[in-house]
Each structure stands twice: as C-alpha cells, then as structure tokens.
Image: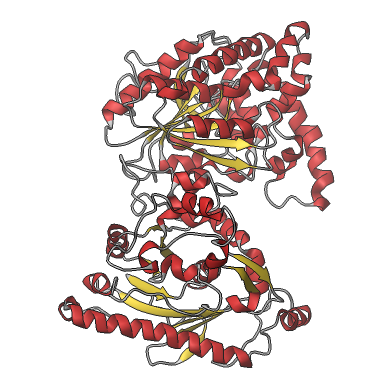
Amino acid sequence: MPMPATVAAAPRPLLPGLPRRGMAPPRGRWSASAASAASRGVAAKAARRGVREYVEAAREMVRRPDGGPARWFSPLECGGGGGRLPGAPTMLYLPGIDGVGLGLIRHHERLAKMFDMWCLHIPVEDRTSFEGLVEYVESAVKSEGQRARDRPVYLVGESVGACIALAVAARNPDIDLVLILVNPGTSFHKSQLQSISVLDLVPEPFHLTTPQLLNFLTGNFMKIPSTIVGRGFSFQEAGQALSEITTSLLPSLMSLLDVLPKESIVWKLKMLRTASSFVNSRLHAVKAQTLVLASWNDELLPSREEAERLRDALEKCRIRNFKDNGHKILLEAEFDLATAIKGAGYYRRSLETDYVSDYLPLTPDEFQKATDHIRMLQYIANPVMLSTLPDGKIVRGLSGLPKQGPAVIVGYHMLLGFELGPLVTGVLRSSGIHIRGLAHPFMFDKKKEKIMPDPSYYDMHRIMGAVPVTAGNFYKLLAEKHFVLLYPGGAREALHRKGEEYKLFWPEQSEFVRMASRFGATIIPFGVVGEDDICDMLLDYDDLMKIPFYDILDRMLNEDGVKLRTDSTGELKYQRIHPVVAAPKIPGRFYFIFGKPIETRGREKELRDKENAQHLYLNVKSEVESCMKYLKEKREKDPYRNILARLLYQMVHGLDAEVPTFEP
C-alpha cells in the first residue's frame, strides 16, 4: 500500500512488540511519490496544523483498500531520533473512533524530541475486536517494558484509545506505565454517542452530517478558524477565516467518507460501548500513573464529570481541565500536549521523576503563556528592577548580575509570592538567565490538588522550572550551574500575618552557605517591596482559626505535610499552608534590587567551618534587609509610584514605553 510522507510505516511484527529501528523485520518508508499530496499540506508549520491537515493526511493513508490488521507506524517527523533526548521513553498513541493514528499531527515534532513515538493505525475495513486490540497493544507494552526496564512506557489514548490504555494497564499492573487519557470514552453510557445508533437508518454520505458526527470530526465549531489561521486570528480576519472554511475545510471533510464510512463508524461505536463496560469493571486494577485531560466543551462525552470520577476511582490519577476546548482538543491550536504533560509533572525518563534532569527547557510559546499568566499583575505593578555592580554602584537593569552560574539568589518572599512571576519572567526576558526555584512540596502533592479550586494552579511553576525544595535538588541544580532561587523564610514568610510585611522569618542556622561554597556559587541577595502598595490584608491565619469549622480545612491542607525544618522550633518548623484574604488598593509599584554579588569561589575550606558559614549567612540576611530598606526609602521619591501617574505617562509616550523611576 502506498504510504504518505508524513509517516514511516512498519509492518506488523512477526514477534510481539514494536519493530525496532535498524533491526529486522525492516521498516519500509512510505514512498514520497505516493504521498506528494499529503506532504503539501502536512509539511506546513506545526503551528498551522489542524483539522484540514489531519483530513488531508488521513485521506492519503486510507485511499487504497486495506483490510488490516492494525499496525504501528512512526510519523516521519519522529523518525531517526535526531534531536531526541537521551534515554527518551516510548510513547504509544492509541487513536479514537477514526482509527487513523494521526490525532497528534500538531504535536509530532515536539513530542519526537521527548519520546520514541509510535502510533496505532487501525485500517478502515479492519474488524479486530476490542479485546484483540488490547492484546496487540499489550504485546508492544510488554516488549518495551522488557527492552527498557528503567523507563516508563507512555500510552496516549483518545476516547476508545483511552479505554484500550486503561485495559492494558489493568492487565499489567507491574509494568511502569504512564497513561495520558484525552476525553476518555469510559463515559459512553452517559454520552450523546449512544444516539448515533440511528446511523443505520441514514444513507451514505449523509451520515457525516449528523450533528454528533460533525462535532466529533471538527470539535467545537467556533474553534475551527484558529486551527486554520493559527494564533493571531482577529475579528478583522473573521471573514477570511470563514471563507477558508467554506472553500477548503468543508470540501476536505468530504474526503473523510473514505476514512469514516458508515459501516466502520457503526462497528467502532459498538466497540466503544463494549470497551467502556469492560474498563469500568476493572478500574480498581489500574495502578498506572494517570493524567486525564478533560474538555469542558466536549460535545460528545461528559468529559468534565468523567475526569472527576476517574480521579476518585484511580489510585495515581490527576486531572487537567480545559474550559474552552472541544472533543477534538488535540487538533485545536491553543492546546499543546507536551506542555500539559510538563505542567502536570508527568514527564520522566526513569522509574522516578527527577525534577532536575527530567526538566525540559521553555519553548517560546510556554514563555509567552507564562507572561500572559501574570500580565495583569505586570501591568498594575509595573516592576522596577535594579542591580548592583561589583564596585557597589546601583544601576537600573540587570547588568550587575553574573553572566554564568552557579548562583544562589536569596531574598524576601512577598505575600502569596506576588513577586515570583515578575521576577522569573523579568530576569529571563532582560538577561536570558533562567532562574530555577526551590518550591514548597505542597505544589507537587497530588492529594492537595483535590482541594484546590483549579488543579492546574501550580502547573506554570513547574513549566518554569520549579523543583521541590530538598537538599538533593539543591545539590543537582548547583552541580549543573543553574541560577537557583531560594527563600529561607519559606511559607511562613509568604503567608505572614498582619503587620509582618517585609519581616524576614529565616531560621537561626545557615541552610545554604556551605552548599553554595561547595560549588563555588555566587550568592546574590535581593530585596523586593510593593505588596503593601497593591493590597491590604483582611484575614490572616490567626483570624481564620477563629472562624467556625476552619480547623477542618486547616487539617486537610496540612495533614501529612512535609516538615521542611526538623531542626527548627515553633512555627518555622511546621510552615503551615493556609489561605489569605486581602483587599486590593489603588495599585502602587513593585521594586526589586539585587545586591552586590558575594563570591564563594575559593572559600570552600573557609566556609566549611560552621562559624564562618554562620557569619556569612547573617551577612546575607543583613544585605537582604538593607536592600528592602533602600527600596522603601527610595520609592518615596518615585513620581510614578501611583498607577494613575504611570497611565498618564504611557498615554503620552506609548503603552510599551519604559516608565521612569527614582534615580538610583
């Protein structure tokens, strides 16, 4: 069968498992001459791929009759391993009802750097039963589990593919699996798909025009323009986008008559009914690490409610909600599967997650999302950043920061960590320095996600490189010459009480000096002020504890909590997590200053002595306090401290103009 240039095909192996690259049986590439039409559409930039490119590639894959059986193929962009991370785990993609195996077409290039990726293709005329497909996937999983025992196998499944993944996991609890379930079909008995049984009464090709199938094929109709024109779609381009839908996308949908003939759809819907019943009776046996991606605008399945049910039913399950996306979320321009996996902390290349070595650098899109995430705070606080040169001179900007790591940035933790976003994104944008933060383990705790308003609340911290605060992670970051952000005051400082702003809650003994000196790291003290310029605290922890029944929530937040400072006493030892109620004010401004860098290179023997290390520790603490004192005094001379003055300045000079401040 001719094969499109978008994939490198492998015949079904004679032995269980995947055909390995470079090993017998040989893997044939689909001929370029037979796939020229597919390559024209699919070779476009990944950012522009969507429904249309999927349709064109799918048409080429099935344009000649092929009765089966099911087989694995590797997308062309994923072949050869160029640029792939060492020790990358295997990812097996299990398609939904369409069965083509190209559902990740928008994500191939990026996933190819993270995984050894294979996709399951179920030919249109294939009638392998659900149990048969489970056994076929299971053979590949067992083969990969044997080949690389120290790495997980990822199963990414849509609708019925998610059911296959869960069935394989239930049958193989001892294999290290990571399941990524996209709008899983386990809720079939509650879905609109049941009503498609009337398809038997609808003649071809009109079965594709039923509302349920049209939604299934295109996802949320209002999302389609963004899949065509990509980001940057505006109201001015609406007419052009709709015209392109009419002239290009809708005719392309007719090509799906070859991909989804009525007989095939009826067969696969019956399979989904069987799959849903099969899997739901075996959820208790699933021990695999699982991430459920749920679209709130899913037109076919009650994915939002099903995600909650699966989280409660599965032992190691997290969910991520996508409020504006539809059933075909993988084809929608705003969604990135790799980012979702990273944000949930689900990417690993070994038996346990290593938050340092498994971290993947930011992409431009991820940095843009991080910037958008704090855009409102950035706008109202308009941060001023100052740094100190080696000669002690204070300058605006970050020219005083060292050019290379390792370095430890140590400072004050503002209320609720307001300074984190502007600090990390501002430094990266201005200097190219990517700061890795040591964060409270609460941010990585699956159990605590259940009581958060949004389970993805801390995903951006993980995407930006935060790791749980442990001595081991601190050691690894310094060994790899990172810039490490450390808050000795921890949660007690970020969740301080009324009247405690700008007060340091550092432990008595040094925690980081000797580790920094071991790697010759530069210590950079910094101060930040401005929380009192944007809000007033209404209720602190002492107030909350007086509210009836709050103690129940307090126990939920802090039960089984990690005690970060077992050698400290009192409140510094327990670092309780709790909400804070604050009221906004007419915004002032944030001010950052990085103090004079303190070199530890060449002082390892000196700082190995506890007394010398303690002396330097107290000096760093004093520098942080001096930085904040300096800022509190200087901001009184800033004519643009108030947001109204800044707005007037920007009205005159442009919204992107840098607003002046006091003279350093």
Number of marks in the rendered image: 0
Q: Where on the picture, by quarter, is residue 379?
A: bottom right
Q: Is residue 28 visible?
A: no
Q: In this orientation, which residue lies closer to the viewer: 425 or 34? A: 425
Q: Position of residue 175 (x, y in %)?
A: 33, 27
Give the side of residue 574 with respect to residue 629, left or right.
left
Give the side of residue 191 with respect to residue 65, left or right.
right
Q: Where on the picture, by quarter, is residue 612?
A: bottom left
Q: Position of residue 508 (x, y in %)?
A: 31, 76
Q: Is residue 468 visible?
A: yes
Q: In this orientation, which residue lies closer to the viewer: 195 or 66? A: 195
Q: Position of residue 422 (x, y in %)?
A: 55, 69
Color encoding of the figure: secondary structure
- Location of residue 359 with respect to 623 vertically, above or below: above
Q: In this orientation, which residue lies closer to the viewer: 494 or 88? A: 494
- Location of residue 257 with respect to 460 vertically, above or below: above
- Location of residue 322 with respect to 654 vertically, above or below: above
Q: Residue at x 66, y 17 (%)?
A: 260
Q: Residue at x 37, y 52 (%)?
A: 355
Q: Position of residue 569 (x, y in %)?
A: 32, 68
Q: Where on the picture, by quarter, is residue 619?
A: bottom left
Q: Residue at x 72, y 76 (%)?
A: 586
